[in-house]
Structures are given as structure tokens and as C-alpha cells.
Amino acid sequence: MWAAVRRSVRLRILLIALLPLLIVLPLLLLTAVKSWTTRFDEVLIAKVHSELTIANQHLAGLLANRGAAIEALAASAAFQATPPAERQAFLESVRRKLGFDFLYFTTKGQGWPVISGALAGHTQSAIDIFSADDLNGISPELAARAQISLVPTKAAVATDRKGESRGMVVHAAAVAPGGALVGGVLLNRNLDFIDQMNELVYPYGSLTEGTATLFLEDVRISTNVRLFEDVRAIGTRVSAIVRGRVLDEGRIWLDRAFVVNDWYVSAYEPIVDSFGKRVGMLYVGFLEAGFADAKRRTLYQIALTFLVVVLISVPILLRWGRGIFKPLERIDGVIRAVEQGDLGARVNLAAKEDEISRVANHLDSLLDQLQEREKRLRGWADVLESRVTERTEDLEAANRQLEQTTRQLILSEKLAAIGEITAGVAHEINNPLAVIQGNFDVVRDDLGPRGDSLRTEFSLIQEQIQAIHILVTKLLRFARPEEYADAGTGHDPNVLIGETLPLVQHLLGGAKIEVTLDLQARGMVAINQTELQQVLVNLLINAIQAMPDGGTLYIATADLVAGHVQISVRDTGLGIDPEVLPRIFDPFFTTKKALGTGLGLSISKTLITRASGTIEVASVQGQGSRFEIDLPTIQG
């Protein structure tokens, strides 16, 4: 067979035409489909993993919120002013307002690390498991709420238990005068909490409708997984394989799993209590069936498409192949005839615009074509040499630019180090400030009624302490914006301008510059607070430096149509050279030489553009410059 293929042009052309379509293409298609299905599954796992992260952050947020609420109550004047005899009644009224299931004052640790930590001076919050006796000691109603009947569940670990009487509690304690203030929220049957988590992980309009669950060990104590349309699967249990991976081994589960009565793309992670024990699990996931059906439909469509392409393409390829090997067979027959002495034999092909016809009818023109191509090659060689020279010069210029960029980056690293030092200094100020505040409170409490005559002085001291605290907080926000990120919320530009001016007050104080404010905007801008402050500080510093002999600094805000706010910063300084103006937003471009990095306006434009806004500049040399920021507002 292979010998016949080597001798026959016809067979080789047919193989060349059909081999890629019938063998190579199917192999490539199978490889691509396998890679696609693998990637498809990886995308689903990555999606559920990110959803688990959101759910975990929501649970952590609940812990932090409850701890902060307890700490704020313990530090409140109302609590500290309540007599011990009336304290429990006061706490009961506050408990309902704050949404706690229990709230009490104690002087004993009671064996809970959270309470012991609070008595030692540290506010703490954690997940703890309360026994039925613990809950009954707090409130019989709370113990009744925690009771859950176990529902037989497919694939779960076999058990003789009929119910779960323990309660999973968000347990928080804070330092209070003379003891600790303790509060908690029962998570058993806490449907509001689990529904809020589900709405956060799977908001309305998202690609999937998922579910979220809180487990006490392997029992669902709060979930929106359904047994039936209106019946939640509270009391059902997790499958044995998931329990072994998450509870016994302490590992995160990211895979498909059987949930109650169907297969889900699932993510589980262990929940650890204040004793460091794994006591439960947090779960999010979505039904696998819809994605599996979509995958099958896609594979069917690919297979059907391939079959249709083959049925249409093979006849066309065979026809095209015949148009190639028929003329070649005629040429071969003529050559054989000439070898046998038939000098009058001719191919007699009709003139066509194809390669075979040109070979048969214009063979003598090849030498002329080769000579012409040689000339063209010489010309291309000269052009190539000149282009190499030009590229060499461009490379040298690029190297010089790279050296300049490297120097600028080193300077940027120094500026970053200065920011770290600023943040460190701010933290160091906070420590003695806290000592001053504490001792001031002790002195004021110790004087009691005797200090009434110094009330005015005390108020002034308290105001100055608060002013220092606010200034330190602003420095920290400016130096470490990532720690104070608040994306997704609107901010009042007028308030941000008021908070930014103190950051450049040291520059204004040494210059004869008058600041004029015209803050008319009412919209809330959709940008990170610290990023907008960074932009404003940069513009204000540039404006101050543009007025070395003094002048007027105008800052204005106004509402624009279509839900936008405009922030204007205008100075009466030196202005910008018209030749320089188009380049001021370029990275590393500066006219300040050693005094500037050339990054301020470039970074400012990047931050504004990332917030879907614009920044524009207009300047008249000798009369000043005006920067206008246009930002979208948060729509209510």
C-alpha cells in the first residue's frame, strides 16, 4: 500500500486533502474539548471558592460587629452610670435594641476563653458551642430555639442521635468597669443571618442561584437548602466524605458534593471555636445540573457541527484534488511520450491562472523571474541594513529612557518609605495619646464635683485630644489607604475637602495664600475616600507651589447633570507653559527637576479614570491654572 502511495501522485494528493480533515482535525478537536471541559470545571470550582471567601468574610464581619457593639456599650456613659441594682434591667432593654439573644455583666471567667480574655483586658468575639444546660441557664426560650430534630440524610454518617440540643453562638465579651460585659447571638435557626449571607454571595441577577448553610458539626442548624418548596433542610446532615475531609482533617472542600437530595458544586470550610476545636462548617454552593446540561449540549453541538463539516467538505476536497492530479497525469504522459521518441507530443492545456498551467506554458520565464528576484533581494538587504541602524538608535534611546525610569522608581521607593515612616509616627502618637486620655479620665473622675470649677478647662483639653486623634487618623488613612478602603459606598466631596485641607495646612501656613471655598455639591461621589484625598492633596500641593509669592486658592464643588459631581481646584499662580501642558499627565514627566517625581498627576489621573471619572486642566501662563474633576455619583 505504501509503495503504491509513493508511486502515485493521485493517492498522495488525496491523503494530503483528507488526512487533516478525518484524522488530525478530530484529534485536535478531542484535545480542545477535553481542555475546555477541564477548564470549565476549574472555573466552577474557582467561582464557588470565591463565594466561600465572601461567606467567610460575612461571618467574620458578624463576629467583629458583635464584639464592637459589646465594647461600645461597655465604654458608654449610660452603662457606667447605671447602678448595679438596675444594671440587668438596663442590659435587657439594650439587648433588644442591639439584637443580642443574651447580654449580662459578670466578674467570673466561667471557663470561656472569650470571657477570660475580656477580664484580662482584651475584647474578644468567637464562635462557641453552648450545651443545653448552658442555654437553659441563660433562658429556657433560648434552649428551646436551639432544639433541632435530626432528619435521616442520604450518604451521611450513621448515628443513633435523634436530635441536636446544643447551640452555636456568636460569643463576645468586652472589658467593663469591675468585670466583663458578655453577649451572644444564637445561630441555630437564625434564618435572617443565613439569608443575608446568601443574598451577599448570590445577589439578585447573578449567574447562579446558590445556597448557604451553617453546620454544628455535621448537622444543618441554619440553611436555605430546601427539602421541599417551603421546607428548609434544617436537621439534615452532611455527607460522610465531606465530614471526614472538613471536620476530621480540617481541610477545605472544593468539589461536587451530594447535598440533601441533589449534586451541588460545593465549598465547605471548618469553623473553629474559642478553644481551637473544629465544631462546625460553613458551606456555599449551587446546583450542578444546569452546568452539566449546558456542557452536554455544547459537546453535542460540536460533534454535530464536525459531522456536517465533514459531509460537506469531503466531496469538495475530492473535486479540488481531481483538478490538480488530472493535469499532472497529462504532463507525466507527455514526458513519457517524448522519452519514447514522440517529439510532437504536447500537453495542450487550456490557458488558466493556476500553478500547473504556468509550469506547462511558461517554464522559460523562470530564469527571468529569478534574476528579477535577485535584484529585489539586494534592495531588500539595503533596506534591512538601514532599518537595523534605525532600530539600534531606537534601542539606545530606549536604554537611556530605562535608566531615567529606574532612577524615578528608586525615588518612588523612597517616597513609599517616607509614607511608612509617617504611618509609624502616627501610631507612636496614638500610644501616648491613649495614656493621656486615660489619665485625664481618671483625674476628672477622681475630682468628681470638686472639678466643676475646671469644667471649661477640661472641655478644652478633651477637644484638643480629640483633634490630635482625628489628625492622626487622617495621616494613617493617607499613608495606608488600603487599610481604610471603603469601595462601594458614596462620599460627600465637601466633607472630604474639609478633611483634606488640614493635611496641607503646614504648607498654607508658611505662604500668603488665601483659601476660598464654594462647596455647592449635594451628590455622593463613587470613589474610594483615601484615593480621592490623595488626588486632592496632590492638586493642592501643586497649586501652593505655583504661588510662591502668595495668591488665592479656589476650591469649588457643584452638581452636574446625569448624576455627576464636579470638583474644581484653581490657583492664581504662575500657570503652565502651553508646550508643557499636553504632557503633564505623562508618567515621570516633571518640571520641578529634583523636587518632583513626575508621578503625582499621572497617578491622580489613573485613580480618577478607575473611578469612571475624568480630570481636565486649563491654564493661562502668568494667570494660574484650573483642574476640574468630574466624578459619577452613587445613585440611591
Image (tube, helix red, strand yellow):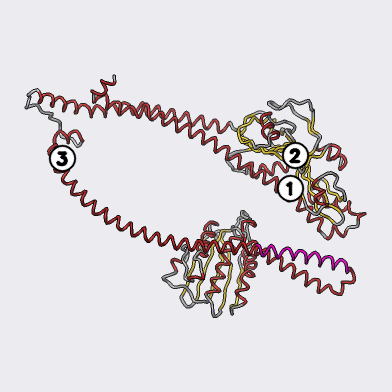
Helix, strand or loop under label 3: helix
Residue 636 in sight in this render: no
Give percent across and percent down for residue 454. 84, 74
Residue 306 in sight in this render: yes
Task: Tell me where the magenta segment starts and ends, as one range.
Answer: 424-447
Residue under the point 13% across and 24% down: 336
Nearer to the camera, 248 or 501 = 248
Q: Earlier in the sequence, mark 2 or mark 3?
A: 2
Q: Earlier in the sequence, mark 3 or mark 1?
A: 1
Q: Is residue 219 magenta?
A: no
Q: Is residue 437 magenta?
A: yes
Q: Which residue does the numbered mark 3 point to in the structure image? A: 366
- Position of 10 relative to 375 (above/below): above
Q: Which residue does the numbered mark 2 point to in the structure image? A: 277
Q: Amino acid at mark 1?
A: Leu
Q: Quadrant of the C terminus?
A: bottom right
Tell us which disc is closer to us: 3 or 1: 3
Q: Is residue 352 left or right of residue 211?
A: left
Per the model, the C-alpha gap separating discs 2 and 1 is: 17 Å
Q: Quadrant of the N terminus?
A: top left
- Position of 193 relative to 164 (above/below): below
Q: Earlier in the sequence, mark 2 or mark 1?
A: 1
- Position of 99 relative to 512 (above/below): above
Give percent across and percent down for residue 292. 55, 31
Mark 2, other Cα within 10 Å: few <14 / some 14–19 / many ≥20: few
Tell us which disc is closer to us: 2 or 3: 2
Which quarter of the picture shows residue 571? Answer: bottom right
Q: Amino acid at mark 3?
A: Leu
Q: Which residue does the numbered mark 1 point to in the structure image? A: 63
Give percent across and percent down for residue 11. 27, 24
Contact (CB < 8 A) between labels 3 and 1? Answer: no
